[in-house]
């Protein structure tokens, strides 16, 4: 079985030399444990932060140990005193970046491949989906009739934020993304009212053009110039849900923008950071509502699946570069 180790702490953009794919034996599951053959693993932007040796909301990856993260797979063996599992069951758990994982039975969640493809439990029906749902509806206090702007809009979280806003009665949904192909997808497949390519001109100007009457909610996945543009376009009592700031994850210098923070006062804006783990209580309504929209076709999603554990680091770096449309997934086995 193979697993990825972090072997050096990246400075700025990570390189392949910071990682090693190592061969290890497959362990037997002990009491209370299951052995899982992972079929899909998630690569996520937050993992970049865990490569730094700094105290944060999740502990850093340890050097020369397997990295971890969301994964789904098939139960290959069940240890003694592990109630509730049989070989062949499908589970979601937190020990990705490896082909086989020994998981505490209590830390795995049973999932049903007849309801949705396994990879969906890492994306549209999983962590990124719940981030979109809770961030928009709870953190940003979305109200029917709001005009919503979301950055990173062709990605896993962003594409779902925009569609949930539309389905919940937003008066206008605007998205930004990094290619014309992605912009077209937002307009034609996801039903955004307006969208622009942030690489083609200043974000502030493009946003003003897309939202001439301003915006009420900004769902931030990017930070930097996007956040500055949103503060400029937000209406009085507007809300910002700060979900991510991917534009600065590899930065070696502090970010210069936003320059216009004093506008927060006069506009009485509310800006709130979020972590999806504070919102697991919304999982029930989230799965019911999003599951319904998936079944009736009103919510669409894409995944970019990179096959092979040997390509997992390339997939992670590709995610940071914007090579994905929708959730970036690594396929490990059928
Ligand atoms: P995405 O699927 O959105 O993939 C990341 C995307 O970011 C890329 O596809 C790329 O698209 C875009 N991007 C990369 N660099 C830049 C840049 N400099 N400026 C603008 N866009 C850039 O990832 P996720 O949906 O998983 O995550 C989206 C955001 O949400 C991230 O910031 C992540 O950290 C955050 N997040 C936060 C959570 C929380 O609990 N707070 C939970 C989950 C995610 P493009 O081609 O458009 O540039």
Image (tube, rainbow, N blue to C red):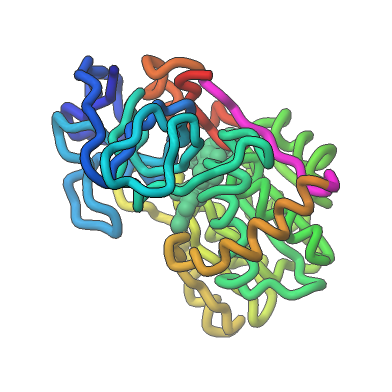
Residue 264: x %, y % from top left: 53, 77
Give the residues in magenta. Answer: 296-306
In the rendered image, is residue 282 in sight?
yes
In the displayed structure, would residue 240 be above or below residue 69?
Answer: below
In the displayed structure, would residue 229 be above or below residue 44?
Answer: below
Instruction: Verify whether residue 187 appears in magenta.
Output: no
Instruction: Verify whether residue 305 appears in magenta.
Output: yes
In-front residue for pair 124/326:
124
Give the main secondary structure, helix, strand or loop, of the magenta stretch: loop
* Image quadrant occupied by the N terminus: top left
Residue 59: x %, y % from top left: 23, 51
In the displayed structure, would residue 211 be above or below residue 80?
Answer: below
Quarter of the image for residue 234 reads bottom right
Quarter of the image for residue 247 reads top left
Locate residue 23 relative to residue 258 in the image: left or right: left
Residue 18: x %, y % from top left: 23, 25
Residue shown at 83% from the left, 66% from the top: 169
Quarter of the image for residue 263 reads bottom right
């Amino acid at each position: 079985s193979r697993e990825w180790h972090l072997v050096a702490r990246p400075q700025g953009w990570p390189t392949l030399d910071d990682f090693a794919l190592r061969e290890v034996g497959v362990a037997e599951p002990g009491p209370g444990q299951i052995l899982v053959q992972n079929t899909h693993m998630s690569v996520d932007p937050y993992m970049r932060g865990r490569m730094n040796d700094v105290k944060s909301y999740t502990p850093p990856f340890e050097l020369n140990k397997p990295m971890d993260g969301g994964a789904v797979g098939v139960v290959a063996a069940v240890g003694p005193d592990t109630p509730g599992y049989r070989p062949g069951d499908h589970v979601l758990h937190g020990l990705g970046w490896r082909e086989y994982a020994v998981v505490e039975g209590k830390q795995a969640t049973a999932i049903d491949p007849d309801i949705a493809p396994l990879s969906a439990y890492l994306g549209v029906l999983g962590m990124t989906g719940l981030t979109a749902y809770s961030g928009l509806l709870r953190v940003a206090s979305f109200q029917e009739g709001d005009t919503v702007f979301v950055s990173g809009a062709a990605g896993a979280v962003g594409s779902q934020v925009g569609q949930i806003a539309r389905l919940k009665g937003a008066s206008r949904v605007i998205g930004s993304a990094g290619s014309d192909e992605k912009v077209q997808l937002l307009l034609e497949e996801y039903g955004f009212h307006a969208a622009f390519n942030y690489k083609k001109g200043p974000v502030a100007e493009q946003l003003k053009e897309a939202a001439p009457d301003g915006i009420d909610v900004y769902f931030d996945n990017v930070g930097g110039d996007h956040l500055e543009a949103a503060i400029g376009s937000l209406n009085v009592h507007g809300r910002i849900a700060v979900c991510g700031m991917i534009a600065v994850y590899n930065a070696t210098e502090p970010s210069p923008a936003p320059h216009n923070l004093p506008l927060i006062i006069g506009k009485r804006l509310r800006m709130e950071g979020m972590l999806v783990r504070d919102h697991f209580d919304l999982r029930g309504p989230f799965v019911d509502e999003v599951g319904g929209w998936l079944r009736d076709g009103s919510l669409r999603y894409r995944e970019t699946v990179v096959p092979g554990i040997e390509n997992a680091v390339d997939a992670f770096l590709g995610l940071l570069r914007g090579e994905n449309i929708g959730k970036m997934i690594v396929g490990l086995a059928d």
